[in-house]
Amino acid sequence: MSEAGGGPGCGSPVPQRAPWSLVAATAALCLVSVTSVWTAGAAPMSREEKQKLGNQVLEMFDHAYGNYMEHAYPADELMPLTCRGRVRGQEPSRGDVDDALGKFSLTLIDSLDTLVVLNKTKEFEEAVRKVLRDVNLDNDVVVSVFETNIRVLGGLLGGHSLAIMLKEKGEYMQWYNDELLQMAKQLGYKLLPAFNTTSGLPYPRINLKFGIRKPEARTGTETDTCTACAGTLILEFAALSRFTGATIFEEYARKALDFLWEKRQRSSNLVGVTINIHTGDWVRKDSGVGAGIDSYYEYLLKAYVLLGDDSFLERFNTHYDAIMRYISQPPLLLDVHIHKPMLNARTWMDALLAFFPGLQVLKGDIRPAIETHEMLYQVIKKHNFLPEAFTTDFRVHWAQHPLRPEFAESTYFLYKATGDPYYLEVGKTLIENLNKYARVPCGFAAMKDVRTGSHEDRMDSFFLAEMFKYLYLLFADKEDIIFDIEDYIFTTEAHLLPLWLSTTNQSTSKKNTTSEYTELDDSNFDWTCPNTQILFPNDPLYAQSIREPLKNVVDKSCPRGIIRVEESFRSGAKPPLRARDFMATNPEHLEILKKMGVSLIHLKDGRVQLVQHAIQAASSVDAEDGLRFMQEMIELSSQQQKEQQLPPRAVQIVSHPFFGRVVLTAGPAQFGLDLSKHKETRGFVASSKPYNGCSELTNPEAVVGKIALIQRGQCMFAEKARNIQNAGAIGGIVIDDNEGSSSDTAPLFQMAGDGKDTDDIKIPMLFLFSKEGSIILDAIREYEEVEVLLSDKAKERDPEMESEEQPSSEHDSQDQSAEQITSSSQEADLVGAESPEESSLNSHPESSESSSPAEMDNAANVSPSEQNSNPTENHETTSLDGECTDLDNQLQEQSETEEDANPNVSWGKKVQPIDSILADWNEDIEAFEMMEKDEL
């Protein structure tokens, strides 16, 4: 998401308003012009090793791209676990995530310029021909304006940019006559109706065939959009205008940016996450540099680089000053409230902010870039990947990882800025982790849970568009690339736009004269084009000296969380009451609640209810404090609930031809062997007879010494466990009888006991939903002998067995360092705040959900919406990795029982066998229902 490497002519800072028309390319490249300095703290990597790693990146790209073309094309994306394409409307909906799919061969278009960067010019020429021949942009499908712009329009423009470059070189693309540009122009006109609002901010979605607001369009009723969605258009739209001479695209994108700038919070100079596209009111008033805002800031700076309009630089510098003043808490970047920026809006960070160190390199502010990058790297070393969200004390908040490239992007730019070989080692770690934990026979699979190593059946197009591009460039020397990468700027999707566009077909749109820029310290602007001698004051250990204090920030410390205190508090005033400090028995706290318009009500059933009425607050400031308090209480309660639930477990297929590459998410049992405290259980699987395991097994010889497969239903889970244990099984896997169920769409399922003493059950028991269970059943039909590993997390692949079958394989894996979770299952009734005027929160310290009389398998469906801990006590929450547990404050475990009500599902249904796992997993295998709606 940042600009390419350095260039000549950067001996001193560029003034705030640079004469761009004179030195367009030179000034642009000047922004990241440090390529020769490296610290003595890390040994330089030999050219041979860099070439080896570069070749490894090429092989990995071939594996991902080749499987997409073989098994998925012309579908938008590859489903790497089932080896087939994801087609919109033919797979279960994943919510907003699917808005990127428009039946336009998304992955192919997104990968076009990656092929050229990786020197695959023949493949690029073939890919362009396929796009021109097969891609249709007139589909009756509703797509995201933002995603379509950065991925498809950006992909077409990036492909066009490099196609004309290759044509000029005289060897390839001699037949090319701007066909990709014409497709881009067609798509641009299809997106323009989205801008038909009074504000100029675009609707978030549009129908490619019918546009906006028509009955058949099925869109146009939305009122809100994210700041990044409206503010990440200027590079692609301006490039389209500069390439074609049609100024309308750049004018529309500029108008949207102007409106966002006008609506910034004037006292803090921050913008919110979500805005009403008609009124311009902020809907979500929290502000950060991650999801929802990220690329808005990125495009302000890059618009200055590409277009030469210094107003964009002024706006960026104004925002950047606010970010460093309020959001930056080195090494953390925490969201704040735009109206009260000294107050944190949340206690966790999302993975998308990993792009920000790269943007800081482009800005020239290297120290905080190094600090934040190092913190993120420590999180990755702990979990192998960057979780979608993690807390301020570095625990997992959202466990997914869809193979995002932002950290690799920042790693590349920090290496370009410092020349420090340390960042080459970081890149090497990324390559190793991708191959060990994400690589599957049909590509690379997203991580469903970084703690267990389980996979998601998705490989997003941005993985090929960005990840391999940045990793290859990290290890490539200048002579390894067939064109000068410094002549281009990267879009947020890493598509390449040529810098010469700055002097071509310039827009006649007037500069926004209504804006008033805040007076800032001039030193803020001096860093726009850094002098390398200022960044590295004759100290080869500069970068290392910044990283050193952060080396143990994740593993060996448990920060309590950071409380932001306004300057006025330092002079004697008390800070506002925080949810984590609240005590229901403290009279002073109750008085503060009353002042904030928050009432505490003790209900007859023992619950405590918090309700806020903003109109009853002593002042508007107190009302805002009350709303923040309620939001914090809800978040705290939800976070504590997540820490109480038992963690997911893993079922890993380790026999030929899987060798540990397939990891299935499994639900735990509240009885039997605890896999988090004992060694994993490994064995061959065998189906029990009867399948439901509700009576003495008739085939004990088949399950003795093996892991028994049992069908859910007709009796208690504990009864099933006793029956297979008595038959000699060393473990059990209960497979859901609800056809089509999947861990991707259902909450974590815990098997509870039967209300009796279950200490007699000594074997481990795990639960698989139907879709995950079908993978094991299909493998048995195909290979008969299937060996699995039951564990708390994915384990090292078997290198001996794999080497016997595949001597050339280099991708056996190692033990993940995913954490073990100490938890309890206390429940609470939580009612979230519906509006600023009235927020409500109920808690019940000692209650549990009542059992359903219609079910018979004792079960606890655990989800944040069902369980919450008591927020009125100041407990230290239990650490997700068990490293920082406050044993004195652990909550008492409780369990709930359910009964199963669907005993009549037949297991006699035939399923097509797996054809060949290594070559082509059976295309007829039923699709997984996909993951819950992506919160990012």
Image: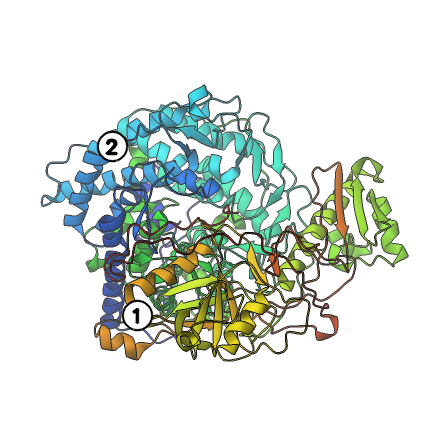
Give the total number of marks visible in the rendering.
Answer: 2
* Residue type, mark 1 in image: His
Mark 1 → mark 2, Cα distance in angstroms: 40 Å
* Residue type, mark 2 in image: Leu
Q: Secondary structure at mark 2?
A: helix
Give whichever of discs 1 and 2 has the lower sequence position.
2
Residue 680 position, x and y percent, is: 47, 77
Judge left or right: residue 844 versus residue 83. right
| Residue closer to the observer: 524 or 292 | 292
Q: Residue at x 51, y 61 (%)?
A: 372
Residue 750 against residue 726 in the figure, above or below = above
Residue 173 position, x and y percent, is: 13, 41
* Residue holding disc 1: 811
| Residue closer to the observer: 32 or 624 | 624
Q: Secondary structure at mark 1?
A: loop
Q: Which mark is residue 181?
A: 2
- Badge 1 crowding class, 10 Å Cα cut-off, few under 14, some 14 to 19, many 20 or more, is some
Q: Residue at x 61, y 78 (%)?
A: 760
Quadrant hosting residue 480: bottom left
**Are dots 1 and 2 in contact, CB under 8 Å?**
no
Q: Is residue 457 visible?
A: yes
- Badge 2 crowding class, 10 Å Cα cut-off, few under 14, some 14 to 19, many 20 or more, is many
Judge left or right: residue 130 versus residue 219. left
Judged by depth in the image, the label closer to the viewer, 1 or 2, is 1
